[in-house]
Image (cartoon, rainbow, N blue to C red):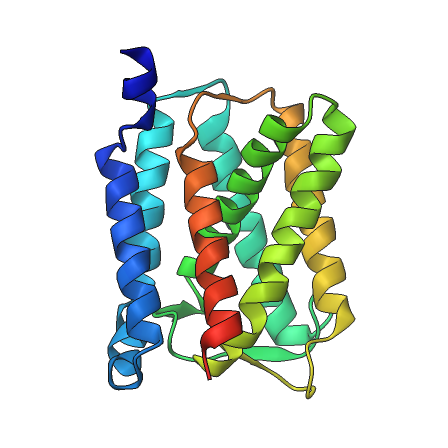
Amino acid sequence: MERKKNIILSKEEIFIYLIYTVGIVGHLTEPLVKYMKLLTPLTLLLTGGVVLFSSMANAKNNFLMWIILTYVITFSLEVIGVKTGLVFGSYWYGDTLGYKVLDVPLIIGFNWTMVILGAILLSEKLFDNKFLVVISASIMATLFDFFMEPTAIKLGYWKWSEISVPVQNYFAWFVISLMFTLLYFRMSIKLNSDLPIKFFVTQFIFFIILFVFMR
């Protein structure tokens, strides 16, 4: 009975897989792309919100504080980045990601937070050594951005002043992810949930598929 229970998908998992499957089909079907772009902020908010709400019920210690700190600081770094070009390189946001404050979409800090969280929990599954977990999570989050960048640019999430994505961007992703992974452990957070991992992997697969097949 226990084995059967483990392979049954939760309603949260079904929701996430369904939404991103529709998203893949929609983004690869030219007449539907404009509708997919319109739904992007809502999709990120709803799917990420489901993951966060479910995770809160399985979290101990300072999880909510970590979420708030990660959101506020990553959003602030994005504002500094857009205004100065000092963090990631010179870039600006389009309208696809929804409502902006100080030229940065409000959803962007939320997705930063969920990506880093998923990378941390997946790395914890793979390694027992805390040092390896920290490095692995930072690399995973950076790789996520690497595969996301071409699709994000095509869909008008953001644009770079340079022809190609600057190496500075990936260095910043690694350092920022490293910083919040270290903070996660410093705050002694305990989270008994695989849903953020499944959300992270689903988004990762989504962007890899679009990276390969979207023209």
Locate the N terminus and report the quarter of the image it occupies. top left
Vertical relation: 163 (above or below) 153: below
The residue positioned 37% from the left and 30% from the top of the image is 55
Q: How many marks?
A: 0
Q: Is residue 3 left or right of residue 135?
A: left
Q: Percent x, y for residue 52? A: 36, 37
Q: Please state the horizontal and vertical placement of residue 83, each as a whole percent of the image.
A: 62, 74
Q: What residue do we see at 76% from left, 68% from top?
A: 168
- Is residue 157 visible in this depiction of the protein? no
Q: Position of residue 192 (x, y in %)?
A: 44, 21
Q: Is residue 4 left or right of residue 137?
A: left
Is 157 on the left-hand or right-hand side of 133? left
Tell me the quarter of the picture where residue 92 sits: bottom right
When the figure is inspected, residue 164 is found, relative to residue 45, above or below; the finding is below
The residue lying toward the viewer, choosing from 109 and 130, is 130
The residue under the point 27% across, 56% down is 19
Indicate the position of residue 30 as horizontal and vertical percent values: 31, 85
Residue at the (68%, 27%) spot, across then down: 127
Q: Quadrant of residue 116?
A: top right
The answer to whether residue 110 is left or right of residue 29 is right
Q: Please name whichever residue, 80 or 154, is drawn nearer the observer in this view of the structure.
A: 154
In depth, the one of 76 and 176 nearer the eye is 176
Q: Is residue 137 visible?
A: yes
